Image (cartoon, rainbow, N blue to C red):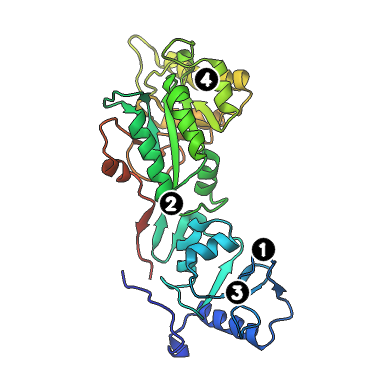
Amino acid sequence: MKSRGRLDPQYEIKEKSPLILLSWLILLGLFLGGCATAQPVPQEMSPPSPPGLKETARAFPEFVAVVAQEGDTFSSLSAQYLKDPSWESFLADYNETESLSPGQPVIIPLQPDQKGGLSLQGYQTVPVLSYHNLSPAESNKMTVSQRMFEQQMRLLKEKGYRVISLDQFFDFLDFKAPLPPKSVVITFDDGWRSMYEIAFPILKKYGYPATLFIYTDMIIDSPKTLSWGLLQQMADNGIDVQCHTKSHRNLTLREKKESFKGYFENLGKELSACKEMIATKLNREVKYLAYPFGDTNPLVIELAKKLKYRGAFTSKRGSNPFFIHNYRVNRSMVYGDFTLVQFERNLGTFQVEALR
């Protein structure tokens, strides 16, 4: 992909995009007396002005015009004006440059509208991670050790990933709201007690939301499984409890001697009984479904829609663009033998697809 390069005042006017021309005209206005419709930047947002300059930033109803100062970066500007440093790549793309230098004009939209995560370079994708069981020490394919889970959560924090809720994710898919760059969803399946004993404290430590898909027949309060009381504690503290069906049967296969009519009726029970039980026990709305074994078919999807599920998840590995099917969302299983390098390979958050 061709580099956009740094904005240079020496460039001829004909080489500048309309956005950059607007930037320069606004910044020129800052120094020549400003614009009648502009407002001074609030004190908490206003950067210190260097000697000889009366003003380095001015707020308009929908954006702020800024003259970059020594030490400014897109990360620091997005933290200052958008209260979130993760919007740095959005600001760089919006201003058609990859770096800042003192005196450079920057336009900062106060309500970034990047629905679908589309840009001239490609489009945003959102990985949905899936865990099954955790262990204090031992690990196997379906069980991640406590030490490794802690390292994975720390990696997300240190590398600037933003862990989001399922509601935020589906608002993105439905073009209702943009997401911060490097957004990630964390989910767990089944209802193992390790979710409460190991995952829950670590998630609270990092302030991460997560979703637990339970199949309700498993909630029996045994030494290895969760109880409704433990689920209530987690639901009251940032864990979203959603449906993994009633019994965890494969929804795409008819059982031996099961008629089609019986199969159809039993599918409805699998999807509705789980939904109703969670709503009754936890007083929570159930909107999302994880298919057992990741398998689905058109009949299952139509039943999920009829029962007012907003979306559903497979176990197909891969990140999700805005155009993914809402009832065939990808989820990437995190195996217990993953190294951190292998874990990070499942965190794709952008697909390069130049539109220029």
In three-dimensional space, the C-alpha distance between marks 1 and 3, rounded to whole angstroms, equals 16 Å
Which residue does the image show at 47% across and 80% down from the upper left?
17
Q: Residues within 10 Å of mark 3 (few under 14, many from 20)?
A: many
- In this figure, which residue is indicated by the disc labeled 3? 65
1 or 4: mark nearer the eye: 1
> What secondary structure is marked by label 3?
strand
Q: Position of residue 142 (x, y in %)?
A: 31, 26
Quarter of the image where one finds residue 334: top left
Q: Is residue 245 left or right of residue 339?
A: right
Which residue position is annotated with label 2?
160
Residue 322 against residue 243 in the figure, above or below:
below
Q: Report which residue position mark 1 lands on.
A: 44
Which of label 1 and label 3 is nearer to you? 1
Find numbered disc 4 in the image and state the secondary structure of the residue it sits on. helix
Q: Return the residue nearer the eye: 352 or 153.
A: 153
Q: CA distance from mark 2 to mark 1?
A: 24 Å
Residue at position x 49%, y 75% in the image: 70
Residue 284 placed where, x, y %?
61, 27
Residue 76 lies, in percent from the top left, at 51, 63
Q: Earlier in the sequence, mark 1 or mark 4?
A: 1
Marks 1 and 4, Cα distance to the nearest angstrom? 48 Å
- Left or right relative to 147: residue 231: right
* Helix, strand or loop at mark 2: loop
Badge 4 is on which residue? 274
Q: CA distance from mark 4 to mark 2?
A: 35 Å
Q: Quadrant of residue 315?
A: top left
Identify which amino acid the numbered label 2 is placed on: Gly
Disc with the residue nearer the chain's start (3 vs 4):
3
Circles 1 and 3: CB atoms closer than 8 Å? no
